[in-house]
């Protein structure tokens, strides 16, 4: 059951003076390009989500957040037709995504999965070039256009000077940028990223997120990312979807969605939400250990 | 145009004004040509080898149709079919091995390790021991054994897609069962059948004629183009199912087509020449190290398999007296030593 709702006003900080490009979320047309309608998602018999409905606003940077095992990666897999819903449907441009030709989908919607294996002994340029696959055919294997797009994708992600290096020689941060370059070379208006910042140090996390924000702002691509860090999500997202137990608990602009009440409901964590001193976006500060322990005991007695 | 000058290695593109383009890796192309030449040269030498030696020049002249009548019979009727079977078996094993290893994303995922050879042997032994079948029946038995084993491995390993390790482990399990069955059949066999079975199991090209060439040729003629048509998808599948799926590859379909082709190629090769060990395992590894390019290296593996098998057959005749040593033993020694040498010399690069 979907119950999109806003949980109370934010505890601290003014509510509406941010100049985030949230207004881009307003869909020009009534129908967004990518949506899930009443989908039930399951692996074999294990049901992850039931009757879940999600709209990805066009030209948004949508971030899906939620606790571990809430179904956020599963939702992303369904949106990218990696997982076929056992009920309901995922629509891309008004068509059921599974019924569309595989390459046509791949020219519209790109996905950077959580785990990707670089083949042994592959160079950066070669790997990025593989992103061109959906644009190629047996008689159109490597056009001048392919070459130009690959060059641009590498330049945009800052890996151009690594073009001739082997991918397995690179650091984790560089490697992630190479994979993003490959996804960019696919030239899809929609790009889905599954935890693109995992395993990166803080500087590289911010690097990757800045890159995503640029792609969204400068090229108008629709980005959907699963992120673990709520503060990153609040800072970079234009549209936030909070999931818990396979249900959408809240969705909307981060300023409206990220509240202490919501964080407690979704993550079970007591916290304060203050203004990010850099950007003015909501910043989640977990309550100190002692405060949380007291609250935990109180909650426990309340339940019993 | 700095970046254009900066890409000295890796694939190049050939483009026509009409917007068509073909991707070429110069090094891979040279390797393929050299291996093909080596396979053909070894074939010519092999045809000239035997109780009645013929010079390479005479062999080529006879093959092109203007040799002496005496040599013509020896070349065209006795030795050419054997060499062609060798080339086809080697090529099938090399290609089949490359496909298996690419699909399982694991060098151990080759038909030798997965038990296809054992399965084919079991089929052949059933025909020999239980039915005392003719040569043709034994060949059919081996073919059926290989196909059943392949299907069994695929079904047991399938669980929301086939994953590399699962495929290898299931294959090793199936291989163990097939080996046990073979052992049982051998102990049940009477002396004559057992001797015949052991000869079959050593893997040899002795006494192969045109009857074996045609089916192999037809099979290769159908399967090689089919496989190559799916090669681009397979190249993407190296990066994992998710990435290739996202790039628009129909992963399960490509995998099924290629696995079935690989099983057919391997089973047919085994039925024709017995379980020649190690070609399917080593040929793709050797080819990859020579081309130094990622990707399944299908054509290079095919040529490498053919060259390896014909060279091994020549070595087994020449170095150990005529036909004394089964070709399977030599492929193991040749391919194994060469692979070890490559691995040792490559160690400083830190790659596997």
Image (cartoon, coloured by chain):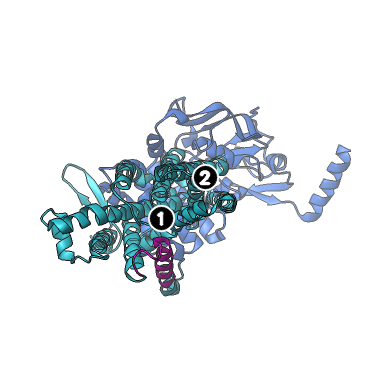
Chain colours: A blue, B cyan
**Residue sitting nearer the eye, B247 or B141:** B141
Q: Nearer the viewer, residue A156 or A126?
A: A126
Asked whether residue B34 appears in the rendered view, the answer is yes
Q: Which residue is mark 1?
A: A157
User: In the shown orientation, is residue A300 left or right of residue A78?
Assistant: right
Residue A183 pos. (x, y %): 42, 47
Residue B100: mark in rendering: none
Local SS, label 1 = loop
Which residue has dot 2 on it? B126
- The majority secondary structure of the magenta stretch comes to helix
Q: Chain of mark 2?
A: B
Question: Where is residue B183 drawn, in percent x and y?
Answer: 58, 54
The boundaries of the magenta stretch are: B321-342
Question: How far, Cα to Cα, is label 2 from label 1?
Answer: 61 Å
Horizontal side of A276 relative to A7 (left or right) equals left
Task: Tell whether position A119 is magenta.
Answer: no
Task: Provide residue B76's location: percent of width, then percent of height.
Answer: 21, 53
């Amino acid at each position: 059951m979907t119950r999109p709702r806003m949980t109370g006003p934010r505890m601290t900080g003014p509510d509406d003076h941010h100049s985030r490009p949230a207004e881009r979320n307003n869909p020009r047309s009534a129908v967004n390009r990518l949506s899930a309608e009443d989908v039930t998602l399951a692996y074999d018999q294990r049901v992850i989500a039931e009757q879940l409905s999600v709209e990805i606003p066009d030209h948004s940077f949508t971030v899906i957040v939620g606790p571990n095992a809430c179904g956020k990666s599963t939702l992303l897999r369904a949106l990218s037709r990696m997982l076929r819903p056992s009920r309901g449907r995922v629509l891309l441009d008004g068509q059921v995504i599974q019924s569309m030709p595989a390459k046509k989908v791949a020219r519209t919607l790109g996905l950077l999965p959580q785990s990707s294996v670089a083949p042994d002994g592959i160079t950066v340029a070669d790997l990025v070039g593989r992103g061109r696959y959906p644009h190629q055919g047996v008689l159109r294997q490597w056009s001048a256009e392919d070459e130009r797009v690959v060059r641009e994708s590498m330049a945009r992600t800052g890996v151009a000077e690594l073009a001739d290096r082997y991918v397995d020689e690179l650091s984790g941060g560089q490697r992630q940028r190479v994979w993003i370059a490959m996804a960019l070379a696919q030239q899809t208006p929609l790009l889905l990223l599954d935890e693109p910042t995992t395993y990166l140090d803080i500087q590289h996390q911010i690097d990757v997120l800045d890159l995503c924000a640029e792609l969204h702002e400068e090229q108008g691509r629709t980005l959907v990312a699963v992120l673990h860090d709520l503060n990153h999500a609040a800072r970079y997202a234009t549209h936030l979807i909070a999931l818990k137990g396979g249900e959408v608990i809240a969705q909307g602009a981060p300023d409206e969605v990220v509240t202490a009440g919501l964080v407690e409901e979704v993550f079970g964590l007591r916290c304060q939400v203050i203004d990010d001193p850099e950007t003015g976006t909501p910043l989640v500060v977990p309550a100190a250990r002692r405060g949380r322990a007291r609250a935990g005991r109180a909650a426990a007695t309340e339940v019993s | 145009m700095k970046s254009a000058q900066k890409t000295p290695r890796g694939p190049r593109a050939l483009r026509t004004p009409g917007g068509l383009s073909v991707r070429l890796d110069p090094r891979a192309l040279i390797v393929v040509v050299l291996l093909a030449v080596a396979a053909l040269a070894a074939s010519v030498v092999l045809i000239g080898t035997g109780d009645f030696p013929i010079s390479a020049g005479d062999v080529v002249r006879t093959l092109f149709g203007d040799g002496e009548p005496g040599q013509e019979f020896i070349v065209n009727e006795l030795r050419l079919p054997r060499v062609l079977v060798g080339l086809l078996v080697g090529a099938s094993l090399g290609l089949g091995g490359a496909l298996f290893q690419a699909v399982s994303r694991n060098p151990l995922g080759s038909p030798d390790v997965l038990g296809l050879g054992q399965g084919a042997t079991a089929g052949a032994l059933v025909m020999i021991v239980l039915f005392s079948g003719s040569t043709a029946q034994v060949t059919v038995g081996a073919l059926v054994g290989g196909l059943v084993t392949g299907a069994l491995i695929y079904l047991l390993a399938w669980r929301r897609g086939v994953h590399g390790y699962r495929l290898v482990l299931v294959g090793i399990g199936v291989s163990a069962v097939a080996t046990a069955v073979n052992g049982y059949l051998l102990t049940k066999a009477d002396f004559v059948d057992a001797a015949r079975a052991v000869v079959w199991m050593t893997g040899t090209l002795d006494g192969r004629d045109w009857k074996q060439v045609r089916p192999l040729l037809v099979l290769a003629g159908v399967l090689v183009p089919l496989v190559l048509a799916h090669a681009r998808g397979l190249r993407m599948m190296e990066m994992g199912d998710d990435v290739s799926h996202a790039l628009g590859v129909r992963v399960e379909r490509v995998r099924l087509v290629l696995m079935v082709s690989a099983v057919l190629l391997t089973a047919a090769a085994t039925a024709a020449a017995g379980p020649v060990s190690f070609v399917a395992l080593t040929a793709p590894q050797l080819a990859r190290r020579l081309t130094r390019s990622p990707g399944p290296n299908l054509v290079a593996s095919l040529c490498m398999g053919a060259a390896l098998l014909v060279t091994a057959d020549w070595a087994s005749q020449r170095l150990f007296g005529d036909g004394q040593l089964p070709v399977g033993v030599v492929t193991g020694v040749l391919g194994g030593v060469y692979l070890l040498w490559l691995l040792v010399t490559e160690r400083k690069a830190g790659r596997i």
